[in-house]
Structures are given as structure tokens and as C-alpha cells.
Image (spheres, rainbow, N blue to C red):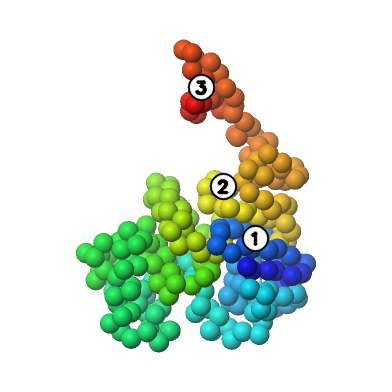
Amino acid sequence: MIEFRSVGKQFADGTRALADFSLTIPSHSTTVLVGPSGCGKTTLLRSINRMEDPTEGQILIDDHDIARRDPIQLRRSIGYVMQHAGLLPHRRVIDNVATQLRLNGVPKAEARRRSSEMLETVGLGSSLHRKYPSQLSGGQQQRVGVARALVHDPNILLMDEPFSAVDPIVRAELRDELLRLQQELKKTIVFVTHDIEEAFALGDQVVVLKTGGEIAQVGSPVDLLARPAEAFVEEFIGLQQGGRRLRVQDAYGRRIVVDEHGRPAGVLE
Ligand SMILES: Nc1ncnc2c1ncn2[C@@H]1O[C@H](COP(=O)(O)OP(=O)(O)OP(=O)(O)O)[C@@H](O)[C@H]1O
């Protein structure tokens, strides 16, 4: 469990990103932080592995205050995936992944074996392992980024808009792949996005943020749709524009679901 207790963050230039932010992130499930640009999502994420330190309040992982942990040790114990995979261009795919283990003191042969297995797990076959990152597609590079983040078997995986730089089809593929992986691995995932569809697809818990890191609502996708806490949430999840209002129409004896424009969206079983 990750717990934010009255966390505040003011940057050196005086910008206040967070004030009195409190949230509990349960273990073994996916929490998505979603909100408009600049609302503090990345700052929240980076404060979990101490890439940023709060200026007020506390963050606890399994009841231990992370301010007391060595930041480098902490960072190495947590998986982190960024928007651009951030791979080392002069290193082969397998070595990009293995580096993570080598830093944690795993011998070279074992590091390569485990890296190879993890690359297979994220859907990258052995023919790609000895290539360089520039020889891979954007989606494949992101998969390497995920493999690198998971290879040392961290309990926590932080993902900062990991799929936003790839095209929509690959993005959907990566999203489905993450759902599959998570069913198997049951990590504590904290996922940042400004895309509400992605938040609904991935999140067990979705946190809708407003500017200044203020929480508009925390709940499951069903909670947000059925009981939006305020107009901001309704608008953010697309209820006000009517985009999520579906209706049932009868056609040829079957019940067809249509959207607000009357376009068919599916069949009701
Ligand atoms: N190093 C910094 N120095 C000063 N201000 C910063 C710094 N990093 C972020 N900020 C500011 O803090 C606020 C929150 O930024 P953050 O990157 O956490 O937002 P975000 O929700 O992740 O945005 P986006 O969706 O655009 O990535 C913004 O106002 C931003 O300009």
C-alpha cells in the first residue's frame, strides 16, 4: 500500500504543484491518476520513487516513511516506465533490460537469462533481443521499457503516460497487453494519463485530479460513471457532452445499443 499524507510540493522557482494531497493506493491493483495537463500527475508519480521530494507531508510504502529510505535504493526497487522508453541507444535490447539487474548485483549470465524471459513475457521474441533500440518500432521500444521496469520483479510499477507516443492501434494493443500481464503479475501499478478511456480500461481505482493536484473524485470506473461527484468529473469523463449516454432501440426483435447520435454501438444480450 502506498499512502500520501497531506503531501505538498513547491518547486524551487515558487511554483506550487501540490497542496495537502492525501490518497491511499491499494496493493496488487492498478490506480490511474488522470487529469488535465499540469495538474500534478507526474509530480505525484515521481514522488513515489523520490525523483521528487515533497516539501510537506509524508509518503509511506507499506507503513514505512520513504523519506527515511536511501533514494537510489528505493528507485532501484521500483519499476518505472516513461513516455519515451528512454532506452540506451548504443546497447542491445537484451542489455538495456539486463542493466537493471546488473545494477542490483545480479551476475551477467543470469541477468541475460532473466532479461530474455521477461522480453518474451512482454511479447518480444528472441529475434529482437540482439537488436539496437533504433531498429525497433515505437511500440516494441515501449515493450522493452516495460520489460526493463519489471525484470527485477518490483512490487510497484510506476507508468508515466507510457503509451502516449505511439499510434492509436499500437496503443490499444499495449493497453490490452498490460491488462493481461497485470492479471498474471498483480503488481501495484500507478499509471498516469490524461486519457479517460485509458483510465477506464486500466484502472481498478481512478483518481480524477484538478489543477493544483486537488482530487475531484476517487473511485472505480463504475463509481465515476454512476455517481460523478461534481460537474468537473461529469465533464472530464464525457457525460456532459453526451458521449457516454447510450440508449437501447429495438430492431428486428433484437435490442440494439445506440449512442447519443443514434449510431449503433452494440447488441444487448
Ligand atoms: N521542476 C519544476 N519546476 C517548477 N515547476 C514545475 C517543475 N515540474 C513541474 N512543475 C509545475 O508543476 C505543476 C505540475 O506539473 P506536472 O508535470 O506534475 O503535471 P502533469 O499533470 O504531469 O502535466 P502533463 O499532463 O502536462 O504532463 C505544473 O504547473 C508544472 O509547470
Residue 206 percent coordinates (x, y) = 62, 53
Q: Secondary structure at mark 3?
A: strand
> Mark 1 touching mark 2, by CB under 8 A?
no
Mark seen at residue 263: none
**Nearest to the observer: residue 26 or residue 140:** 26
* Ligand 1 has an atom within 8 Å of the beta carbon of the residue at disc 2: no
Tell me which numbered mark, 3 or 2, is placed earlier along the sequence: 2
Q: Secondary structure at mark 1?
A: loop
Give the amino acid at mark 2.
Answer: Phe
Residue at 56% over, 58% down: 30
The residue at which mark 1 appears reads as 38
Residue at 68% over, 36% down: 240
Residue at 76% over, 44% down: 230
Tell me which numbered mark, 1 or 3, is placed earlier along the sequence: 1
Q: CA distance from mark 1 to mark 2?
A: 21 Å
> Mark 3 touching mark 2, by CB under 8 A?
no
Classify residue 134 as left or right of residue 191.
Answer: left
Above/below status of 224 relative to 191? above
Mark 1 residue crowding within 10 angstroms, few (<14) / some (14–19) / many (20+) = few
The residue at which mark 3 appears reads as 256
Mark seen at residue 200: 2
* Ligand 1 has an atom within 8 Å of the beta carbon of the residue at disc 1: yes
| Residue 86 appears in view | no
Residue at 71% over, 51% down: 217
**Nearest to the observer: residue 114 or residue 42:** 114
Image quadrant containing the N terminus: bottom right
| Residue 182 appears in view | yes
Mark 3 residue crowding within 10 angstroms, few (<14) / some (14–19) / many (20+) = some
Residue 126 percent coordinates (x, y) = 24, 65
Above/below status of 201 relative to 159? above
Q: CA distance from mark 1 to mark 3?
A: 40 Å
Residue 222 falls in image quadrant: top right
